[in-house]
Image: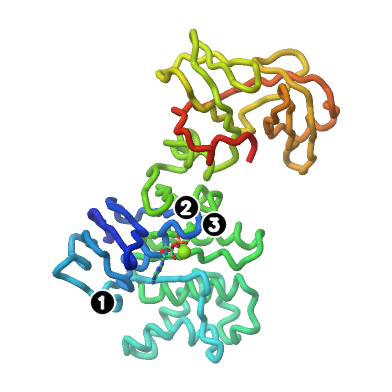
């Protein structure tokens, strides 16, 4: 069992508050991802769970036992946690087997038990045939799996992963996502995963915690944060989005600047920002709520990434790749908007740009 309760945790370095009133419960066997831009406080949160940093105020418990509070502090080595960092440090002078065996040797387990456990873990991370190799004879992905194996061999109930895939190339990153998820399921462990990569967060997590400047913006399943982002920051950070200023009037939202409008029966009134994901617009030569001219198209193999000029403004549309054969630059097109979101205009220009 490994439940983590984070109660109203604030962390400051000197005068600078880097995490503010973080309040969350992570359930046993849950895969939780902390997602946000660089510097938003993700690593600091992970280090506090591990016991490498103390909260300035608030309390952290693991399985109901307080590990950090004003009165209590349990050191990292007594928290029964496995960790893998971005710069996975495998010992260069030890074989794969000895790297993975290391935590068990520290625990002074007998030789036969160590051999049995290491072989079991090497099998789980698909490294059995590399047991006798040195790290410099391995690829980046294999080294990363050694680090993962070493974190898992002591059978922690809780695994903390800090951007563990960021040093790998794109293809390997994608396959490692599945492997980590498989290991988490097979071992039945709780994982807290840190990344700034939204696709990674979407692919693996049960729940994602989106953070900006030390403040939680939204907590939800990948589907919830993608389809129903709580605010403009989340809509912008998770996925691609067009933001267009608008004005609600008589059951429609006028898209200021575009000179066109969409039917709208939601609760907001007055000045708003309309957010449309580029893949939620379908291009048509016959009909659609909006119309414009094709400004550019980029054939990317799996999709056709288009910019549509509407009254001098550009809207990004991710269309079916086959549409590339049927459409031409400068052609008049209709835009069928399948789904859009409407936010109160927060007045900041940070997230009211068209096309990202
Ligand atoms: N030991 C430290 N002393 C002072 N500032 C720190 C320290 N560790 C982190 N910070 C600051 O805290 C903020 C959050 O850092 P971090 O948790 O590493 O962000 P992330 O992992 O989301 O990129 C950053 O502004 C960083 O500079
Ligand atoms: Mg970090």
Q: Nearer the viewer, mark 1 or mark 3?
A: 1
Determine whether label 1 and label 3 are within 8 Å by CB: no
**Callout 1: SS:** loop
The residue wearing badge 1 is: 75
* Residue 31 numbered tag: none
What residue sits 31% from the left and 71% below the top? 53
Which numbered disc flags the more N-terminal residue, 1 or 3?
1
User: Which of 151 and 312 lies nearest the eye of the viewer?
Assistant: 312
What residue sits 51% from the left and 28% below the top? 273
Q: Spatial distance from mark 1 to mark 3, Cα to Cα?
A: 32 Å
Does the residue tagged 2 have its C-beta within 8 Å of any atom of ligand 1? Answer: yes
Determine whether label 2 and label 3 are within 8 Å by CB: no
**Callout 2: SS:** loop
The residue wearing badge 2 is: 36
User: Which of 243 and 160 lies nearest the eye of the viewer?
Assistant: 243
Q: Quadrant of residue 44?
A: bottom left
Which numbered disc flags the more N-terminal residue, 2 or 3?
2
């Amino acid at each position: 069992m490994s439940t983590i309760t984070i109660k109203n945790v604030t962390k400051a370095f000197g005068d600078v508050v880097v995490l503010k009133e973080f309040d969350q419960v992570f359930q046993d066997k849950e895969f939780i991802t902390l997602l946000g831009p660089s510097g938003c406080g993700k690593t600091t949160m992970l280090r506090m769970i591990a016991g490498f940093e103390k909260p300035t105020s608030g309390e952290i418990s693991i399985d109901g036992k307080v590990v950090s509070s004003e009165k209590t502090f349990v050191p990292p080595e007594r928290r029964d946690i496995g960790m893998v960092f971005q710069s996975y440090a495998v010992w260069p002078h030890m074989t794969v087997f000895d790297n993975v065996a290391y935590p068990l040797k520290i625990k002074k387990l007998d030789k036969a038990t160590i051999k049995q456990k290491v072989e079991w873990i090497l099998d789980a991370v698909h490294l059995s045939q590399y047991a006798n190799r040195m790290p410099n004879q391995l690829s980046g992905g294999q080294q990363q799996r050694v680090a993962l194996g070493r974190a898992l061999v002591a059978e922690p109930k809780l695994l903390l992963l800090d951007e563990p895939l960021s040093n790998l190339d794109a293809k390997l990153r994608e396959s490692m996502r599945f492997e980590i998820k498989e290991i988490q399921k097979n071992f039945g462990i709780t994982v807290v995963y840190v990344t700034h990569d939204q696709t990674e967060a979407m692919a693996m997590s049960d729940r994602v915690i989106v953070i900006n400047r030390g403040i939680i913006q939204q907590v939800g399943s990948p589907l919830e944060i993608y389809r129903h982002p709580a605010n403009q920051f989340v809509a912008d950070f998770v996925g691609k989005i067009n933001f267009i200023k608008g004005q609600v009037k008589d059951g429609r939202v006028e898209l200021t600047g575009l000179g066109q409008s969409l039917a709208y029966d939601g609760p907001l009134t007055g000045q708003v920002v309309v957010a449309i994901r580029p893949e939620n617009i379908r291009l048509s030569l016959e009909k659609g709520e909006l119309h414009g001219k094709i400004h550019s198209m980029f054939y990317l193999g799996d999709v056709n990434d288009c910019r549509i000029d509407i009254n001098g403004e550009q809207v990004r549309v991710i269309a079916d790749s086959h549409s590339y054969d049927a459409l031409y630059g400068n052609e008049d097109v209709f835009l069928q908007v399948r789904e859009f979101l409407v936010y109160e205009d927060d007045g900041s220009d940070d997230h009211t740009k068209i096309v990202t």
